[in-house]
Image (cartoon, grey):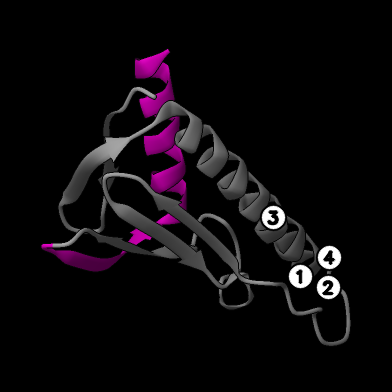
């Protein structure tokens, strides 16, 4: 299983770590599904649907390889995919980083990574 460096651009700075193309494709699918979920909620709100919106299940992605990566997003607090942020936790036996990143930026970073690794 080959790995290449995935770089995720954060609100301030970036993080790079070893990641497999297979895991990137899996994460790409999870994020695409989350973005669709957020788009449908935004469309319902724009259409002026009355009543309380149906709560959506939070999205949680986990990857274990050279590092442990977890990406979490509660779609109930964001009005659209363009406003949404995800909570990223990246850790190994020596260090743990927990930070936020823009959902659309993470999606773009994964697409760029997949283009590079072919």
Q: Tell me where residue 27 appears, x and y as whole percent.
A: 52, 43
For image coordinates 20% across by 42% down, the residue present is 16
Report the front residue among 103 and 99. 99
Q: Which residue is mark 4?
A: 47
Report the front residue among 4 and 41. 4
Q: Which residue is mark 3?
A: 39
Q: Is residue 97 left or right of residue 50?
A: left
Task: Calculate the distance from the C-alpha at mark 1 to the C-alpha at mark 3.
Answer: 10 Å
Q: Secondary structure at mark 3?
A: helix
For image coordinates 87% across by 74% down, the residue present is 49
Q: Secondary structure at mark 1?
A: helix
- Do labels 2 and 1 touch, CB within 8 Å? yes
Q: Which residues are magenta?
A: 94-118
Q: Tell me where residue 41 appears, x and y as whole percent.
A: 74, 65
Q: Which residue is mark 1?
A: 45
The kind of secondary structure the magenta stretch mainly shows is helix
- Do labels 2 and 4 touch, CB within 8 Å? yes
- Do labels 1 and 4 touch, CB within 8 Å? yes
Task: Calculate the distance from the C-alpha at mark 2 to the C-alpha at mark 3.
Answer: 14 Å
Of marks 2 and 3, the one in the foreground = 3
Q: Is residue 95 magenta?
A: yes
Decide: few, some or many residues near mark 1? Use Cα within 10 Å; few <14, some 14-19, many ≥20.
Answer: some
Q: Is residue 28 above or below residue 61?
A: above
Of marks 1 and 3, the one in the foreground = 3
Task: Calculate the distance from the C-alpha at mark 3 to the C-alpha at mark 4.
Answer: 12 Å
Query: Of the residues under marks 3 and 4, which one precedes in the sequence?
Result: 3
State the residue lying farthest toward the bottom. 52
């Amino acid at each position: 299983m080959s790995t290449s460096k995935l770089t995720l651009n954060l609100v301030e700075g970036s993080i790079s770590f070893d990641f497999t193309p297979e895991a990137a494709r899996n994460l790409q699918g999870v994020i695409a599904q989350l973005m669709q979920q957020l788009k449908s909620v935004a469309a319902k709100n724009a259409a002026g649907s009355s009543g309380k919106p149906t709560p959506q299940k939070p999205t949680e992605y986990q990857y274990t390889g050279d590092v442990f990566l977890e990406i979490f997003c509660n779609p109930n607090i964001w009005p659209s995919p363009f406003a949404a942020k995800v909570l990223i936790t990246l850790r190994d036996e020596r260090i743990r980083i927990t930070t936020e990143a823009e959902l659309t930026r993470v999606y773009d970073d994964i697409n760029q990574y997949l283009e590079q690794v072919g």
